[in-house]
Image (cartoon, rainbow, N blue to C red):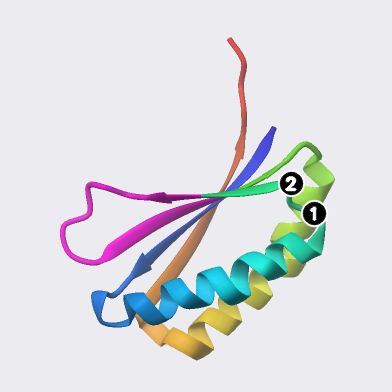
């Protein structure tokens, strides 16, 4: 499995607005792309002030992940910046599941 981990640090002052955007706009658009099989949302527990989430975008195909990262993620980053500015910061990490 291939995963794109998108970490988002969200200011407490815009959290409700951002979380609503995540549920009503971001996730439906990710699902509509058909490149990602599943998106899992995790709250990072060891952040002292702002709220931090790790969004795991999962797929079985490396090309789908690459297409998502190069074609979809830049659009989401611009949209997030236009809506929330520096109050919702995103950075991503590409992962591949390893079996022991």
Answer left or right for 10 relative to 70.
Answer: left
Q: Which mark is residue 61?
A: none
Rendering coords of residue 14 (x, y %): 33, 81
The stretch of residues the image draws in magenta is 41-56
Q: What is the C-alpha distance between the residues marked 1 and 2?
A: 7 Å
Q: Which mark lies nearer to you, 1 or 2?
A: 2
The answer to which of 66 and 29 lies nearer the viewer is 29
Crowd rating for badge 2 (residues with CA inside 10 Å; few <14, some 14–19, many 20+): some
Which residue in the structure is indicated by mark 2? 37
Pick whichever, 70 or 51, lies toward us. Answer: 51
Q: Is residue 78 above or below residue 57?
A: below
Q: Residue at x 79, y 54 (%)?
A: 35
Labelled pair 1, 2 in contact (Cβ < 8 Å): no
Q: Tell me the residue at 40%/75% (across/down).
A: 88
Q: Determine the image quadrant of residue 74.
A: bottom right
36 in relation to 79, above or below: above
Left or right: 6, with 30 as reference point: left
Residue 61 vertical position relative to residue 99 in the rendered view, above or below: below
**SS state under label 1:** loop
Residue ID for mark 1: 35
How far across and down, in percent of the image, does residue 84 sit?
A: 43, 85
In the rendered image, the residue lying farthest to the bottom is 82
Describe the element under mark 2 as helix, strand or loop.
loop
Q: Residue 53 colored magenta?
A: yes
Q: Is residue 65 located in the magenta-colored stretch of the structure?
A: no
86 vs 26: above or below: below
Q: Position of residue 78 (x, y in %)?
A: 59, 82
Instruction: Count all numbered tags in the image, as a single digit.
Output: 2
Residue at image x 53%, y 56%?
92
Quarter of the image containing the N terminus?
A: top right
Location of residue 15 in the rendering, given as x and y in whole percent from the top left corner: 33, 75
């Amino acid at each position: 499995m291939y995963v794109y981990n998108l970490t988002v640090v969200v200011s407490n002052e815009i959290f409700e607005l951002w979380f609503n955007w995540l549920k009503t706009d971001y996730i439906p658009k990710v699902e509509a792309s058909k490149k990602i099989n599943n998106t899992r949302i995790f709250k990072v527990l060891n952040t002292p002030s702002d709220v931090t989430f790790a969004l795991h975008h999962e797929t079985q195909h490396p090309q789908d992940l690459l297409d998502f990262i190069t074609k979809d993620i830049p659009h989401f980053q611009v949209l997030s910046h236009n809506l929330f500015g520096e109050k919702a910061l995103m950075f991503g990490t590409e992962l591949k599941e390893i079996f022991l």
